[in-house]
Amino acid sequence: MLPILYRPPADGERITRRDGTLVVPDHPIIPFIEGDGTGPDIWRASVRVLDAAVAKAYGGRRKIAWMEVLAGEKAFRATGSWLPDETVAAFRAYLVGIKGPLTTPIGEGFRSLNVMLRKVLDLYVCLRPVRYFRGVPSPVREPHKIDVVIFRENTEDIYAGIEFGEGTPEMERFRALLRENFPAEYSKIRFPASSGVGLKPISREGSERLIRAAIVYALEHKRRFVTLVHKGNIMKFTEGAFRNWGYALAEREYRETTYTWAEWNRTKEARGEAAANAEQAAALAQGRLLIKDAIADVTFQQLLTRPDEFDVIAAPNLNGDYLSDAVAAQVGGIGIAPGGNINYETGHAVFEATHGTAPKYANLDKVNPGSLILSGQMLLRHLGWDEAADLVVAGMERAIAARTVTYDFARLMRGAREVKCSQFGDEIIRHMTGAKTVTPPRRAPARSASRSATTKTIRSTKDHPKKRARR
Ligand code: NAP
């Protein structure tokens, strides 16, 4: 059923899925939420950049048919709802969408609209690629060494929202339950009468699907490592289990294409460290992907001191949240950090600016549209339109290198020319001319479903390792 609130553009077609693969027509309908506060400013700049890249890459043969859907303040004004059912239905029906930042309404009982959207579409991966753009002011000495892709689990952990507040009737009932059924655990609470409690569910299924997505990504993009980041030394049955399930998954489903530190440890115990090192070296020489793990606090240190030892990261929700913003800050901050929320089984994906609405700058045509533009670039890649995505990246690299930047970068850069939000978009478009595309060849070529359609491989990740192993 099509949503009643929205009229799909007549010149577009719906993206569909066939055999676990996205089938993308040449004029796909993509729903967008422009967002609150500075959202309209950054959306206006972003959509021009994305359209220009697609037009240039495909000579007019392909074009996105954008369809505005409402959420946040604009939706509330028009419909009385912050997130109308029709908006969720549109993202469900059209599979792939994009959004600007949304105000989180303040008040008891309100959940973030972003979290609601992720939850209803079960977008279990929060994908945050973080790389450096030369010239961007950074607080570290060697920002160019950072090139990591973070897979943050998006549906579990402390974000499941199971909390009991101090002194509430719910807390009292929970306290009684604990005291009567788990007296040993209850005795560990230092101040039971004045505590609030939060529960942290982390499941095998939830961890495996996230880690599987990270491994598939790393294999497809010829990355070197996947690091499972956890605090398993303290939270053994949640974060420690996340690591153990990850290693077991790699060994079960990716036997021939990965080597794990769990294997290294077993070999070390059985035959000594030299034998384990030799085994690992041989596996890596065969081009296998190394699956390792790191405690969360060590990861924060080492991302600063040895960033090139990190590549693809898979992390539970809270660790992933902290890490994504910390690493983004290392390469110049939230103005340009992109993100996507994806379910690789259903094909649903919502790409989004990672910063907030920055309301004090609303309608000033001032803020950096880079985060939403690069999120749009991720969307293009998700469709398999890599040539257009490359043009966006090349245009942004060159605009920043030419020091034509928005206020946030200009205030930290010597010799910069400060431009408005819209002008930064213009600069990116201008710099696409003469840009070379740089997409590395894919291991798994996209399959054409018809002459007029391109496909993006979002196979069932469960099928993927076997196909790869046969190659
Ligand atoms: P914010 O909107 O991210 O703004 C904080 C500061 O970050 C701004 O004052 C500005 O710093 C800088 N900034 C943000 N976006 C920028 C951009 N595009 N270019 C350059 N600088 C940028 O955070 P907030 O003020 O805490 O949150 C405001 C609202 O956004 C809240 O309602 C919150 O719930 C919501 N929010 C939404 C999302 C989302 O939709 N994904 C995420 C986070 C927050 P300077 O003042 O130093 O220039």
Image (cartoon, helix red, strand yellow):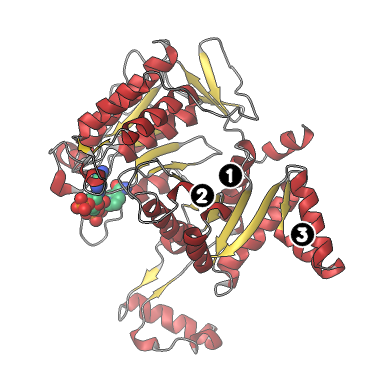
Residue at image coords 50%, 61% = 305
Q: Amino acid at mark 2?
A: Phe
In the rendered image, the vertical position of residue 186 relative to residue 285, given as above or below = below
For the residues labelled 3 and 1, the Cα–Cα distance comes to 21 Å
- Disc 1 beta carbon < 8 A from ligand 1? no
Residue 3: quadrant of the picture: top left
- 419 over 360 or under it: above or below: above
* Residue, disc 3: 263
User: In the rendered structure, which disc, 3 or 1, sits on the residue that comes first in sequence?
Assistant: 1
Q: Amino acid at mark 1?
A: Ala
Label annotation for residue 151: 2
> Which of disc 3 and disc 2 is earlier in sequence?
2
Q: Nearer the viewer, residue 7 or 181?
A: 7
CB atoms of marks 2 and 1 within 8 Å: yes
Image position, residue 99 (x, y; %): 32, 38
Determine contact: label 3, label 1, CB under 8 Å. no
Q: Is residue 375 left or right of residue 177?
A: left
- The residue to which callout 1 is attached is 213
For mark 2, give the secondary structure.
strand
Q: Is residue 307 visible?
A: yes
**CA neighbours of label 2 inside 10 A, class few (<14), some (14 to 19), many (20+):** many
Number of other residues with Cα within 10 Å of mark 3, as a class: few under 14, some 14 to 19, many 20 or more: some
Pinpoint residue 272: horizontal percent, then vertical percent. Answer: 83, 68
Residue 132 location, quadrant: top left
Q: What residue lies at 62% left-to-right and 61% top-to-bottom?
A: 293
> In the visual, does 424 lie left or right of 444?
left
Q: Label 1's element?
A: helix
- Visible in this render: residue 104? no
Q: Amino acid at mark 3?
A: Glu
Find numbered disc 3 in the image and state the secondary structure of the residue it sits on. Answer: helix
